[in-house]
Amino acid sequence: MTPTEAAHLEVAHIDGAHIGADDLHLLALAEQGASARECTHLDSCAACTEEYRALRNVVYLGRAAGPERLLTPPGGVWAGIHAALGLSEAVRPAPPPTETDAATRPQASAIDGLEPVAGGLSSRPRRRWVSIAAAAGVVGLLGGIAIGVATTTGGVPREQIVAEAALDALPGWTASGSARVEQTPDGRRVVVVDLDAPADTSLREVWLLKADASGLVSIGFLDGSTGRFALPASVDLAQYPLVDVSAEPADGDPAHSGDSIVRGELHSDT
């Protein structure tokens, strides 16, 4: 959201025309339930609905990201940053640690991956929005460094399709779609969903369900007809083989609405 859009939301909140930015942040974090006025407004305001959807996606990605192995960029990367910013010698980065230094460092403790939790984001610990915004900035910086490292080394991960599903319409809907799971050589998985359905005002949320629908985990919101969703390492597709796309009201409730548009079972190519 641009500074102009943020200012517009803040001013509009005073006038009562739009939902304030802070309130949208809290709704996306599921730290407060939507009031009757907010529900009515989200049903009719495309701008606030799109902003709410974008914030929910940021929250999910921030909480679903599992522990990653940090890359050590070549020394030339830091030297290039130092030179490009015109920094003084006083802040020149230290040389990379030697193998001996690395061997004497205490090892970080292992961090368990995320477990799918029925009920969605409301079961996660509460955090201030500023923490998520700061984390998003750090992720952007690290992502840029990682791209630079990949460009320097010439390494481009090749994705492999490991499972696919045809998504069929459920009663009350005229729709179709497909889903596939792509995996990179380092084990990262992405669920790619394509949906052909009539446009409406509801949000489209993508879920993985157990075969008997006794458990489910949200993997994000579908913005448009195609979406890519990072799959937490802890999610076992053998336990959650069904891909489901639901129509969700913008009411701040992270639970499944019970109104599924399409659903299909993933089948491995191996």
Image: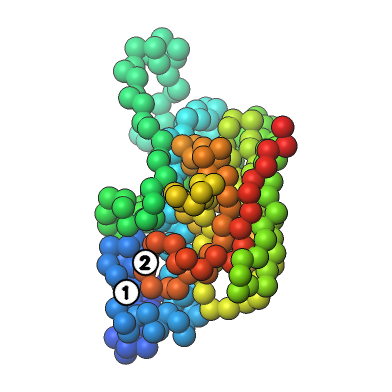
Indicate which label's residue lies in the foreground, 1 or 2.
Answer: 2
Whether label 1 touches label 2, CB < 8 Å = yes
Q: Residue at x 58, y 52 (%)?
A: 243
* Quadrant of the drawing holding the C terminus: top right
Q: Look at the image and tell me whether residue 13 can be seen.
A: no
In the image, residue 124 sits, relative to residue 148, either above or below, namely below
**Reading the chain from its start, which is encountered first: label 1 or label 2?**
1
Extreme residue in the front direction: 212
Q: Residue at x 43, y 54 (%)?
A: 60
Side of 228 where 124 appears, left or right? left
Pick the residue in front: 121 or 237: 237
Way the structure is coloured: rainbow
Which residue type does callout 1 highlight?
Ala
In the image, residue 128 sits, relative to residue 153, either above or below, namely below
Q: Which residue is mark 1?
A: 34
Q: What is the CA distance from the residue labelled 1 to the residue labelled 2?
A: 8 Å
Q: Residue at x 43, y 69 (%)?
A: 52
Tell me the element at label 1.
loop
Which residue type does callout 2 highlight?
Asp
Pick the residue in front: 58 or 191: 191
Q: Position of residue 63 (x, y in %)?
A: 39, 48
